[in-house]
């Protein structure tokens, strides 16, 4: 593949650490202020919509998530000029997946301690698994 520049593993790590995760966190915080409208309940907007439509909060989240998946799909099919840059749609989709993860954790019995809360690869004493 002459003339093709590929992203290195280190460049991708840097992109994830300094750009992607930062953007995800910023979008999540802005969304919480705009949509949740309840500092004590990260899922408030999904619950309000779920109640009005007689759906679960997870089903509502999935509908919102799929809007971004559709936009990403359009981009992949060649529709490059969208109202929002495709990276914004990808960011939003990731935020929705983290919210879904939170719903899954929230629905687990409280006595069960999810492994990921300590960091996926860490144990309580901080050692790696």
Image (cartoon, rainbow, N blue to C red):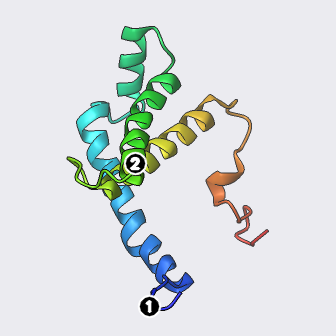
User: Would you name the residue on which mark 1 appears?
Assistant: 3
Tell me: residue 61, above or below residue 50: below
Which quarter of the image is occupied by the C terminus?
A: bottom right
- Which residue is at 46% across, 71% downward? 16
Q: CA distance from mark 2 to mark 1?
A: 27 Å
Q: Quadrant of residue 88?
A: bottom left
Q: Residue at x 40, y 39 (%)?
A: 70
Mark 2 vs mark 1: in front? 1
Residue position for label 2: 72
Q: Is residue 13 above or below residue 72?
A: below
SS assignment at label 2: helix
Crowd class of label 1 (few under 14; some 14 to 19; many from 20; radius 10 Å)? few
Q: Is residue 41 left or right of residue 80?
A: right
Q: Residue at x 42, y 64 (%)?
A: 21
Give how far across and how far down residue 13 sits, in percent. Answer: 51, 77
- Residue 42 visible to an observer of this rendering: no
**Image position, residue 57 (x, y; %):** 48, 23
- Residue depicted at 42% across the width and 46% down the height: 73
First in sequence, mark 2 or 1: give its number: 1
Measured as percent of width and height from the top left, residue 31 is found at: 29, 42
Q: Nearer the viewer, residue 83 or 58?
A: 83
Q: Can you say whether 60 is above or below 84 in the image?
A: above
Contact (Cβ within 8 Å) of mark 2 with mark 1:
no
Camera-side residue of 127 and 73: 73
x, y percent for residue 43:
42, 30
């Amino acid at each position: 593949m002459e003339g093709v520049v590929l992203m290195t593993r280190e460049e991708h790590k840097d992109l994830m650490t300094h750009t992607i995760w930062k953007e995800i966190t910023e979008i999540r915080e802005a969304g919480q202020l705009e949509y949740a409208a309840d500092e004590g309940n990260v899922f408030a907007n999904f619950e309000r919509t779920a109640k009005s439509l007689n759906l679960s909060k997870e089903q509502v989240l999935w509908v919102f998530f799929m809007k971004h998946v559709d936009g990403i799909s359009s981009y992949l099919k060649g529709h490059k000029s969208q109202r929002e840059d495709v990276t914004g749609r990808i960011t939003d989709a990731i935020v929705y997946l983290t919210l879904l993860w939170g719903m899954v954790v929230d629905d687990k019995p409280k006595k069960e301690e999810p492994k990921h809360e300590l960091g996926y690869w860490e144990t309580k004493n901080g050692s790696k698994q």
